[in-house]
């Protein structure tokens, strides 16, 4: 989560759902509103084994956003309390993790409930960070735009400059 944002770290989550969870509610995090995501994130956390991984701004700028996303995924997977038999990754690229069986699934967040659950947890976690850091940087509206290149965010950058949270290698900042 946060790959296209102009600020902050990129997040990933790994989720192993418990058998009793109601999977019908679990859909792509982009297709539900903020309140629903927050409710579902709590529900998922109570009914799964889960972990969050992230990659910092410095890591994004050093190894690029794709590799930083894969690093965040790897960190989330390695933090799980138990090792899954199979890791399902959304998209067509996956991290390389020794002794793990990994399969990519294009549009996995729309097809696989575990991937949907992971996307919900990751998005809610990153949104909390955006809300927290937006308190000091109100002029950028990060609590609303999550650091993405919206018109209001671009205008705020032009007017107020870049912050320590901006990814300096990203257009239009670089």
Image: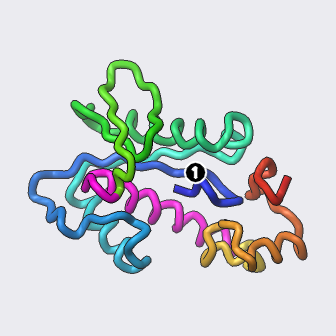
Give percent across and percent down for residue 55: 59, 43
Q: What's the magenta bit mostly, secondary-structure-wise?
A: helix
User: Measuring 64% from the left and 45% from the top, which residue is drawn there?
Assistant: 56
Picture quadrant where residue 134 is located:
bottom right
From the viewer's side, name the closer residue of 130 and 115.
115
Q: Position of residue 88 (x, y in %)?
A: 31, 40
In the rendered view, tell whether residue 59 sits above or below residue 114: above
According to the picture, the residue beneath numbered tag 1 turns out to be 10
- Residue 146: where, in percent of width, then height? 61, 69
Q: Residue at x 79, y 56 (%)?
A: 171
Q: From which residue to which does the magenta span run?
A: 110-135
Classify mark 1: helix, strand or loop: strand
Q: Is residue 151 toward the left or the right of residue 146 in the image?
A: right
| Of 171 and 11, the residue lying toward us | 171
Q: Position of residue 53 (x, y in %)?
A: 48, 45
Q: Is residue 57 left or right of residue 73?
A: right
The residue drawn where x is 33% and y is 34% is 103
Relative to the observer, which residue lies in front, 125 or 123? 123
- Asked if residue 88 is positioned above or below residue 95 in the image, the reply reads below
Residue at horizontal 53%, vertical 46%? 54
Which of the 4 image quadrants contains residue 172?
Answer: bottom right
Left or right of residue 174: residue 128: left
Whether 5 is drawn above or below 35: the answer is above
How would you rate the neighbour count of disc 1 (Cα within 10 Å): few for under 14, some for 14-19, many for 20 or more?
Answer: many
């Amino acid at each position: 989560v946060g790959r296209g944002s102009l600020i902050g770290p990129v997040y990933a989550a790994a989720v192993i759902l418990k058998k009793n969870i109601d999977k019908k509610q679990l859909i792509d995090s982009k297709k539900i509103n903020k309140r629903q995501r927050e409710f579902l994130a709590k529900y998922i956390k109570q009914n799964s084994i889960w972990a969050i991984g992230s990659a910092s701004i410095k890591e994004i700028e050093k190894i690029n956003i794709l590799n930083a996303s894969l690093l965040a995924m790897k960190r989330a997977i390695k933090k799980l309390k138990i090792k899954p038999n199979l890791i399902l990754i959304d998209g067509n690229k996956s991290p390389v993790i020794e002794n793990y069986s990994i399969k990519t699934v294009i549009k996995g967040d729309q097809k696989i409930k575990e991937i949907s659950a992971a996307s919900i947890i990751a998005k809610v976690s990153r949104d909390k960070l955006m809300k927290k850091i937006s308190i000091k940087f109100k002029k950028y509206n990060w609590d609303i735009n999550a650091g993405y290149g919206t018109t209001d965010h671009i205008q705020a950058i032009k007017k107020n400059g870049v912050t320590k949270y901006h990814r300096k290698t990203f257009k239009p900042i670089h």
